[in-house]
Image (tube, helix red, strand yellow):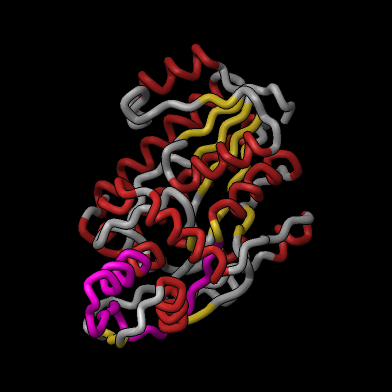
Amino acid sequence: MEKNAKIYVAGHRGMVGSAIVRELERQGYTNIITRTHKELDLTRQDAVERFFAEEKPEYVFLAAAKVGGIVANQSALADFMYENMILEMNVINSAWKNGCKKLEFLGSSCIYPRMASQPMQESCLLTSELEKTNEAYALAKISGLKYCEFLNRQYGTDYISVMPTNLYGPNDNYHPTHSHVLPALIRRFHEAKEQALPYVTCWGDGSPLREFLYVDDLANLCVFLMNNYSGNETVNAGTGKELTIKELTGLVAKVIGYSGEIRWDASKPNGTPRKLLDVSKAKALGWEYKTELEEGIRLSYEDFLNNPMRAER
């Protein structure tokens, strides 16, 4: 990408989109286009087509999505499938119709099968059934990356996909029930510390294994791939390291300074038993993550404390 190229970041107010904007600005890109949801509803095809026809962005980072944790995914299956599928199809199709040089689609590691061999390689996509708790979201994301692949095959476009592992960092959603596991733990342990609670109860039994990537590291990879990768197969974004949810809760409690007891509610779902990405492809391209988990949690907690409106969501 040329430093003055017109770059559209869809979803710039979200955790991933805002990190991509920060990274682009850090690297000296000067012509970044953004639109709020109020200014441009990506689920409205006519509005999206009009925007692309008028602005003609040369490069697109598609980071906009309807996201949430297990509770949100299970309670709004139809909404998650419809909104994600329609917005990504609108953006990708309009980018193609208006001669966009390159588009990067942001997916999620939940696209991979529930019982995929670990660590999960890009090639395991669609080899067996998905995790039921986020099946709707996963199907929408698979449709987006496949549409990019099919445009490449049929029309010779240069559209790529990146599949991040569990993300966290600045501008995360700390909602008590609709957030992902790490930000939910940050809020829960912070409130327990503030209220001097003797114990905190966490979902499941703490056994699932998870991998976490600091969102600014993902943004660095996204810009790197836009400049250095072309291909139909997606690229995994992660650290290649994992820990149990029980270990994660202990680490969050340590960073926040909560010294009470941690209890487990085994009646609540664990989700997928293990989710670790094979990141050898990104490494072979010349990229590696920088932020270790404890440091990333510390930075995320600072964000939580310094953004009261974010903490109230």
Residue 24 in percent (x, y) is at: 63, 36
- Residue placed most toward the observer, 134 or 239: 239
Q: Quadrant of residue 29?
A: top right
Residue range in magenta is: 186-213
Indicate left or right for 218 with 133 as reference.
right
Q: Is residue 202 above or below residue 130?
A: below
Q: How many marks?
A: 0
Q: Residue reaching furthest top?
A: 54
Q: Is residue 109 visible?
A: no
Write the residue at 34% across / 28% down: 41
Instruction: State which quarter of the image contains the N terminus.
Output: top right
Q: Is residue 14 above or below residue 243?
A: above
Question: Is residue 188 highlighted in magenta?
Answer: yes
Q: Is residue 66 visible?
A: yes
Write the residue at 32% across / 41% down: 83
Residue 148 in percent (x, y) is at: 56, 40
- Residue placed most toward the observer, 113 or 212: 212
Write the residue at 54% across / 63% down: 296
Indicate left or right for 16 with 219 as reference.
left
Q: Quadrant of residue 200?
A: bottom left
Question: Is residue 236 highlighted in magenta?
Answer: no
Residue 5 in percent (x, y) is at: 67, 23
Residue 277 in percent (x, y) is at: 59, 68
Write the residue at 33% across / 86% down: 205
Q: Is residue 161 above or below residue 245?
A: above
